[in-house]
Amino acid sequence: MLKIASLVPYKIIPAVTGGEKGIFYFLKYVARYADITSFSVTENAGAVERINFIDVLGSTHKKSRYADFSVFRKIKNTCRSLGIKHIIVEHPYLAWLGVALKKWGGLKLIIHSHNIEAARFKSVKKWWWPILYQYERFAHRQADFNFFITEEDKDYAIRTYRLDTSKCAVVTYGIEHAEAPSFEEKQQSKKQVCEELDLPIHTKLILFNGTLDYAPNRDGLDRILKEINPLLQQQAGFSYKIIICGLRLPAEYNRLKNYEGQHIIYKGFVEDISIYFKAADLFINPITDGGGIKTKLVEALAANTPCVSFKAGAYGVPVNVTGDHLLVVPDGDNRGFASSIEEQLSNLHKDIPEAFYDHFSWDAIARKTMAIIEGL
């Protein structure tokens, strides 16, 4: 069995956010086909799901871990003793270490991109994005192979960073489901959520979920509160509630108490968000920046829940595998977004096609990954 190292610079256990899930489940499923040793932070140390996490970076509270040159020798010696020949670097930030291990440790270097980071930080107006642009370009050009999360990211990187097309592939965010949850399962989830929130069962549940101190998600929340929901209040001919779930809502929002009389419910962090994805009559994704794939949109579709998204928020989700479950609205068209919400809630939907589960299956993604690595 092939032996592969990975470099994970932050906590992913337990996997809560979309980014944490993206790395954890990727490694979990690749570990079905390879021996995985992950050099990581203190919070991940130990053996989990056949992944051997080794603490070399220290705590996530230690910012200097991104420039700790002492870890090079530790990783190089461990890879040599274990017979590891390939290393996957999650995100480009520790690419300097991956390049050093390639040049002086004899490892094949794979950069696993979860966003075009320079473009993401440009979109949220960080002044230092041009510096990151140059570093990210260096990282991808030095790699033996590059994994990107969406076709859009891959095409951007090939064009902008001038990468070799033969050294790039899409390795998307995945799902564990093999099929759509049944109508009965979704109804049971809705009954549970309506009882929990003290709502009549006929209430249309509209869900928004995300880490709420992350600027693109916070901007999406602001659009819901200030633009989209006021339009719905004017024109909706049905009883509805918009449920806001997610970690770290900034204090100035005051837990959305000012919006409680406007069909808004702030639920906060939900231990098992899958129940809410299945319970929702509709998931909304009014995101216009941030880059990469919106994992929450994939998870909502996997729950067989209809969705409405702005175009930028739907990158990486091929509409040809979503049936009638995804309506994509031009970025910034709030009136069109509100109308699409009404349209989706008034339509009868078949189950999302099996092609969706085939495309986003973690196992299929892992097998594709292994075929590429074995060919290096």
Image (cartoon, helix red, strand yellow):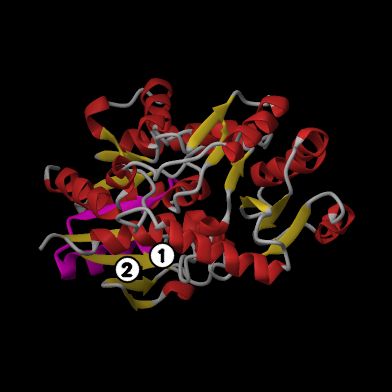
Q: Residue at x 37, y 31 (%)?
A: 151
Picture quarter containing residue 322? top left
Q: Are marks 1 and 2 in contact (CB under 8 Å)?
A: yes
Instruction: Please tell me how crowded label 1 is: few (under 14), some (14-19), or many (20+) other residues with Cα within 10 Å.
Output: few
Residue 174 sits above or below residue 55 on the image = above
- Asked if 343 appears above or below 64 in the picture, the reply is above
Give the percent coordinates (x, y) of residue 264. 78, 53
Residue 70's tag is 1
Q: Residue at label 2?
A: 74
Secondary structure state at the residue bearing disc 2: helix
Q: Is residue 11 left or right of residue 245?
A: left
Residue 82 drawn in magenta: yes
| Residue beneath the point at 71% across and 41% down | 219
User: How many residues crowd mark 2 within 10 Å: few (<14), some (14–19), many (20+)?
Assistant: few
Viewport quadrant of the C terminus: top left
Q: Position of residue 94 (x, y in %)?
A: 43, 51
Q: Amino acid at mark 2?
A: Lys
The magenta-colored residue range is: 71-92
Q: Quadrant of the N terminus?
A: bottom left
Left or right: 355 in relation to 92: left
Q: How many marks?
A: 2
Residue at horizontal 67 percent and vertical 25 percent from the top: 336
In the image, is residue 315 part of the stretch drawn in magenta?
no
Helix, strand or loop at mark 1: loop
User: In the image, which disc is placed on residue 138?
Assistant: none
Residue in the foreground of this view, choosing between 282 and 133: 282
Residue 279: image location, x then y, percent: 55, 58
Amino acid type, label 1: Ser
**In this view, 231 is above or below 71:** above
